[in-house]
């Protein structure tokens, strides 16, 4: 089959013929990829930023990238009972054991034996991908792989962070979304669907803010250097009950703390930078910093329900799988509108 | 009356005669101080570390320090119905409005109009102190002011942090307490009373660790430079579900992050240093950093219940109010065993 | 002043001249009533159904009914700081102490010393009513007393029940609302504003169901004897995650149990009937039955935010205070559209 | 192998030779039974009380009873990775799919495709029993099957109910345990281990109350007809924040409501009777009735941690499997001390 593999850090992916994956365990599921989302993490991986994690997981190059996958079930192991060959599916990004304390509490992303296709094992920038029964979610007839693939990580992560914030976002509160890009534009829609909070969106791009307003933002702030001040003005000088930072670098991660109200919470989603906050501020303002790592299987099921209802839609640009390096260059160069999605030939 | 006042930053307090406080509002309560705890924050205040907060609150020197107070009701305003003259009371550290959203949700410490005696208005290093009905908690006959005064801030803060951690500390989990001093030794007892977790205590002092073991620590670790490694060994290499950092400076605040398990929470209580953690670590390990600021009125009521039951005891060294500067020097020099408590003459 | 008083159970109220209330406590607030909602509980009171509660609270007839009140501040006690004379206000239905454990946790309705105007002390079917600072909520300029008075109990109770249900109503769940009348039609709007759940409304009146659809119901079921079966069909035979029963009598309270999904919750709001469910069913289906009593002060603040945003609107029929007995007769006879609201002369 | 089967309702079980279970699915686990607890539900099953449930699950008599099982792994399917042949294990009472929303949220007991060995498929009153990987929990070396088997249902159910109550049982609260028998005596120990609440135990047997005091009860009340009055006296006339009813019949289920404080919760565990409470009382007192059905897999893991630490111990009487009908008669006749445990020959 055809696949896009990373042979060496800081090099382009090579689109080449590789062996097809085989069912070797009774839970295995082979999926014919219909669409695979392109994520900023793919750029980070290419740059070697995940090398430490990958070395810990004993990854050997080359391997196939792509961790936002949807498609159709091609083959199943003997113990698989929840999907059948031909079903349209989206894939939870992790392969998990189902038996550890984390899995048994629903926190799939903290499985002690979890594997992450596209990050440390072969992913979905290919014709076929191997995962397990526990990662497959059957889609309704109204949803096509290309319309939802990017939800498998981008949407899931945004939804997971929003869901943690729900209980503190009662009427009269405000939530700040920093970054209205691939994840942020889904976060806005999830906030709209799940809470009555007033949504303030901060981005450095006017078109992104325009999209944000269409998707439900109540107020938007151009990140022109005065964004902290503007947000404080919009929140009676106090900051917002919840700040969801989809950027996490280049200063946004520090401004996010300043935008957080006393007793409020900052949800970290984007990465690249570092928190740098005095313990005195943490305690005197009693603020919380909440990490977010993808989401649970049920989170993705719930997000698919919203997608099916039309309450959350993805803005995407599609590329043939062969053009993966163009897509990555467009993403890096800021030329990619919405989420990039790779489509294998014939899908 | 006699009172210990700060006339200038970086100078000793002056014990001197000052005017007695008067009831001016129907809710006012004048308390004859029985005991007032000495806190590391008093050293920070003397050093000018709280100057910014105090300036914001328009504090003018000189003023009376002392924010951990207990005693007997001396006089009450016309609208006070919950205590009577002569009642033994401990004082919640804040004077609050009772009417804002925070107060109405029980979060007294986030009152928009709150005042903090001993920090920004006159405190309890004196014969008398003025507070309001909302800050007074009537004590049972078995509890004397000198036995509980230090609970008003030190105990309350420790209890507040522990109570937040309760729901994640089910059987089989581990909690790390960093610092077994004034706050930490109460935190250990609160963990013991409220949870079935295994308690690991880290301190650089062997006597403090010995006390920790007596109070319920399951394991102790001397902070000799290998404390992170030792804690990881005790937690299968994964870290603890909850880390409560009562130090918050001199590197402890960074080690605390390393001791926190994936999906776990770090409760910041001590201060002085700064968090410095990459957003990548926050998200990839999905950890939470939780600030803690004193506690609610009900937290203090509950802590007094534990004190009354003998489930939590304070280790104290008493000084006459006249010796306040000796006490502060002892605290600074590490010569003060347990929590220092100031006793006015005739109390 | 003019007031409508109950002189004897099972008799019409008498609209008569009575003494004006006076400020006697520093917290007292005298409100000029702008509008007072009429509640089915007023009929129950007249019928003597609350006699036991009233006797326990040592109520002596005659007294003024009316527990859903809004108006303008007429006079304030010396310790009142949150409202000024002339402010437009809605009144939380309880007079509370502010100092007990329940008040300090925000649960005003469980204040050990609470009084309930219109139920056990003089209420708002009058020109003036006395309450305290803790019960007053200042309204924005867009809200008039007659537009919100009925929120003080009806809306508050519906909102309180919905807010408890929020955390279990994730995307893909279903909520059943039994009764789309005075409380139910607000419950539907609160569910719509606070959750992404699918809302199924059951009522025996077609016009009520039509209103329900306008307000956000996804599906409606006429209570024609087959309502349990219909709801089960709409929920894959399993029932709904949340059932909010605004009727609570005449069989609805038993059907509500049947409509509740395994592991789901039935929120009881209406009353008159009795639960009759085998402990075997409670445990084997692991269902919860959750009582609801008005709501907290903050609940009412949040509901006013929704009202101010136009997210929740009340459907009312107004009567002059003089016509109170006509209004009660209309309510009893099923002729009252929406919530009945009494308007004093000159308001 | 030898097994005790029910051939007809209202008849003694027959201990007889039956075919051994076989591994047919890759997840299957065959366990050599070391001990199987005897539960009051076994008497109910014999009496036909579960016939409706069993018919719904298409049970055909005869079948093997016994739903509290522990032993050693005898044989495993090809996909089983969490236990090995020879491991000592306790069995979660349900066989679950692992893939539905309930399973993915950790709520194994609400699995849509769950089977319940000993209730609707063959259970553990036998030499061998078949379950799946998802039901097995590996035990530490200090725990033998006969010491823990009864935890698989009795202990698990008690622990599950206690764990729900934890967050409302802060210092100063009171919890009432009704029934200090097979489940209740574990509930008392779990309350002691997990909460600082004051425990009041009600039972009609003095020896049971004596055991309760040894296990941590703070106060005990003989159920001599004045138990409601006594509990109210012990709770300032208000009742307890949590009432856990392990009896659920013969009037206890009604007294339990009376013992519940306003805003408190009644946890229903025992069954046989019926709740009969006016909706007026449910709302005016805002009480909650919480059903409890066994517990989650993680609940059982946590309970095994407590057992391993010695924090929870079972009081048992052992019988050889051959004497199953004697054991059942002893249980019915009130002659069985502690929990009855059946031991197969050679175990």
Image (tube, coloured by chain):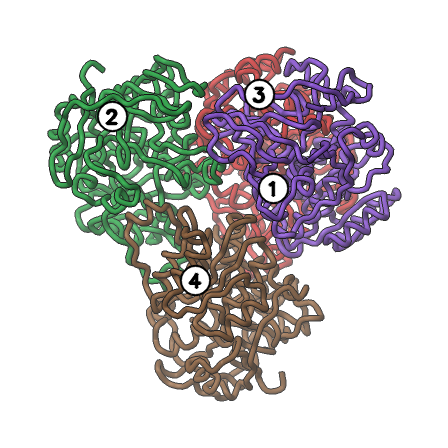
Chain colours: A green, B brown, C red, D purple
* In-front residue for pair C343/D144: D144
> Is residue C96 shown left or right of residue D237?
left
The residue that mark 2 highlights is A36
Residue C254 marker = none
Q: Nearer the viewer, mark 2 or mark 1?
A: 2
Label 1 Cα neighbours within 10 Å, binned few <14 / some 14-19 / many ≥20: few
Label 3 Cα neighbours within 10 Å, binned few <14 / some 14-19 / many ≥20: some
Same chain for the residues at labels 1 and 4, yes or no? Answer: no
The residue that mark 3 highlights is D22
Quarter of the image for residue D11 reads: top right
> Is residue D332 shown left or right of residue A111?
right
Please give the name of the residue rendered at 33% of the width and 53% of the height, measured from the top-left corner.
A237
Residue B100 at what x, y percent from top left?
A: 48, 53
Please give the name of the residue rendered at 55% of the width and 55% of the height, measured from the top-left corner.
C76
The residue that mark 4 highlights is B245
Distance CA(mark 1)–CA(mark 3): 38 Å
Tag 3–tag 4 contact (CB < 8 Å)? no
Residue D137 in the image: above or below residue A238: above
Distance CA(mark 2)–CA(mark 1): 42 Å
Residue A319 in the image: above or below residue C50: above
Q: Nearer the viewer, mark 2 or mark 3?
A: 3
> Is residue C132 shown left or right of residue D47?
left
């Amino acid at each position: 089959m055809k696949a896009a593999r990373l042979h060496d850090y800081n090099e382009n992916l090579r689109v080449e013929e590789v062996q097809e994956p085989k069912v070797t365990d009774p839970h295995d599921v082979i999926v014919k990829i219909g669409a695979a989302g392109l994520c900023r993490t793919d750029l980070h991986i290419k740059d070697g930023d995940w090398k430490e994690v990958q070395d810990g997981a004993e990854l050997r190059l080359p391997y196939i990238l792509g961790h936002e996958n949807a498609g159709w079930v091609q083959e199943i192991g003997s113990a698989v009972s929840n999907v059948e060959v031909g079903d349209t599916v989206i894939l939870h990004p992790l392969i998990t054991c189902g038996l550890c304390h984390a899995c048994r509490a629903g926190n799939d992303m903290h499985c002690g034996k979890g594997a992450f296709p596209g990050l440390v094992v072969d992913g979905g920038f290919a014709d076929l991908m191997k995962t397990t029964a526990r990662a497959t979610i059957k889609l309704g007839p109204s949803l096509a792989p290309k319309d939802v693939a990017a939800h498998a990580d981008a949407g899931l992560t945004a939804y997971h962070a929003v869901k943690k914030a729900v209980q503190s976002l009662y009427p009269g509160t405000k939530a700040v979304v920093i970054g209205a890009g691939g994840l942020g534009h889904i976060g806005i829609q999830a906030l709209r669907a799940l809470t009555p909070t007033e949504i303030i969106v901060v981005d450095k791009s006017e078109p992104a803010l325009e999209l944000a307003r269409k998707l439900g933002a109540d107020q938007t702030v151009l990140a022109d250097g005065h964004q902290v001040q503007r947000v404080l003005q919009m929140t009676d000088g106090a900051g917002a009950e919840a700040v969801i930072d989809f950027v996490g670098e280049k200063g946004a991660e520090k401004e996010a703390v300043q935008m957080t109200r006393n007793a409020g919470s900052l949800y970290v989603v984007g990465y690249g930078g570092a928190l740098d906050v005095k313990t005195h501020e943490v305690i005197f303002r009693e603020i919380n910093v909440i990490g977010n790592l993808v989401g649970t299987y049920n989170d993705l099921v719930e997000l698919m329900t919203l997608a099916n209802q039309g309450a959350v839609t993805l803005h995407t640009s599609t590329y043939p799988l062969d053009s993966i390096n163009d897509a990555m260059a467009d993403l890096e160069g800021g030329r990619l509108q919405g989420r990039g999605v790779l489509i294998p030939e014939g899908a």
